[in-house]
Amino acid sequence: MTFKVFVDGQEGTTGLRIHDYLAARHDIEVLKIAADKRKDPAERARLLNAADVAFLCLPDAASREAAAMITNPNTCLIDASTAHRTVAGWTFGLPELARGQREAIRQAKRIANPGCHASAFILAVRPLVDAGLLPREAAVSATSITGYSGGGKSMIAEYEQQPLPAHLAAPRPYGLALKHKHLPEMMAHTGLATPPVFLPVVSSFYKGLAVSVPLHLSQLKAGATPEAVQAALAAHYAGERFINVMPLRDAATLEAGFFDVQACNDTNRVDLFVFASDSQVLLLSRLDNLGKGASGAAVQSMNVHLGVEESLGLV
């Protein structure tokens, strides 16, 4: 069976990467819009309604506009923007989130693709909340370092100047108003009652992302141990194709002395680590911000929705 797929916003970073994934698929017919009609509402609406699955790779306002164009009840929208990630009637596109999430994605016609920082944070924290190890009321902080491709075409051009300006050579913290656009989904899909204090950092490498979540054992359920934290992650993701829970205090990483932020690049994999001392725990979650952090996650949700092999076209 061949499925018709349209990418609205096909020239953006996420849209281009989705096209790369789809190009090798024999079960997908990609509907393409002519260059001179990319901003033609009638032509966009025609293609959106002709598709079995339509990816929205657009700014938030444009995604809302595109969603309103759909009149075909059989068209499934997968929105890569921030617009619908906590909106009623939209299903969060993270199959590994919790029991029942895959079935929800399979049944949904409106799927909100998670943000890159949010995916890494949620996958590390949600199992601890579900297991009762981390109270919903816990005050949590997180730092995320990411490659510059997450900033889209303008940031990519900025970082690919030759020569590279000196101020871009060092990591750059941002989101300093503490109102990052991923915070609502980071709360909603972990079960935390208050937003984490979140510091994203962009640096001068193309892609790769790692979120760190430091915790005092005293923040966790009384008597909780690092072993219990690692075991909760392992149990939550048992059998998951794309989630790799590493051994407690991963020996290879400790021997190297440094954490490789880019080790999941060009995969749809997420690596989860627990490092610990007698009184503290450090969660680390690593992914490719263009893979499981964006386009790969969108294709994975499409596969789940269509009922084909979930890993089809992904590594």
Image: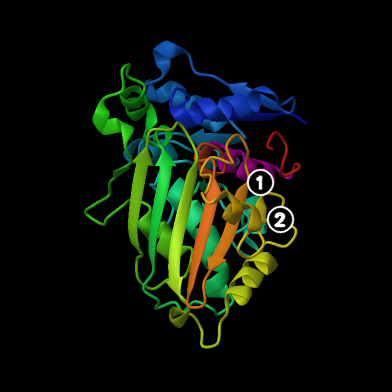
Residue 85's place in the image compared with 56, above or below, is: below
Return the x and y of residue 48 as percentages of the image width and height.
Answer: 51, 31
Count every numbered label the image shows and give the total.
2
**Residue 305's mark?**
1
Return the x and y of residue 108 as percentages of the image width and height.
Answer: 59, 51
**Residue at (72%, 50%) from the top-left corner?**
241
- Residue at the disc numbered 2: 240
Does 300 appear in magenta?
yes
Return the x and y of residue 52 as percentages of the image width and height.
Answer: 62, 35
Return the x and y of residue 305 as percentages of the image width and height.
Answer: 66, 46
The amino acid on which the numbered mark 1 sits, given as a three-letter code, is: His
Residue 215's place in the image compared with 147, above or below, is: below
- Furthest-bottom residue in view? 222
**Residue at (52%, 35%) from the top-left corner?**
55
The secondary structure making up most of the magenta span is helix
Does 22 appear in magenta?
no
What kind of element bears circle 1? helix
Viewed as shown, does residue 50 lie left or right of 172? right
What kind of element bears circle 2? loop
Q: What's drawn in magenta, residue-wise? A: 295-307
**Residue at (67%, 49%) from the top-left corner?**
242
Q: Quadrant of the N terminus?
A: top right
Earlier residue among tags 1 and 2: 2
Circle 1 residues within 10 Å: few <14, some 14–19, many ≥20: many
Which numbered mark, 1 or 2, is in the foreground of this view?
Answer: 2
Viewed as shown, does residue 3 lie left or right of 290? right
The amino acid on which the numbered mark 2 sits, given as a three-letter code, is: Glu
Compare residues 168 and 90 and report the one nearer the observer.
Answer: 168
Q: Is residue 145 visible?
A: yes
Circle 2 residues within 10 Å: few <14, some 14–19, many ≥20: few
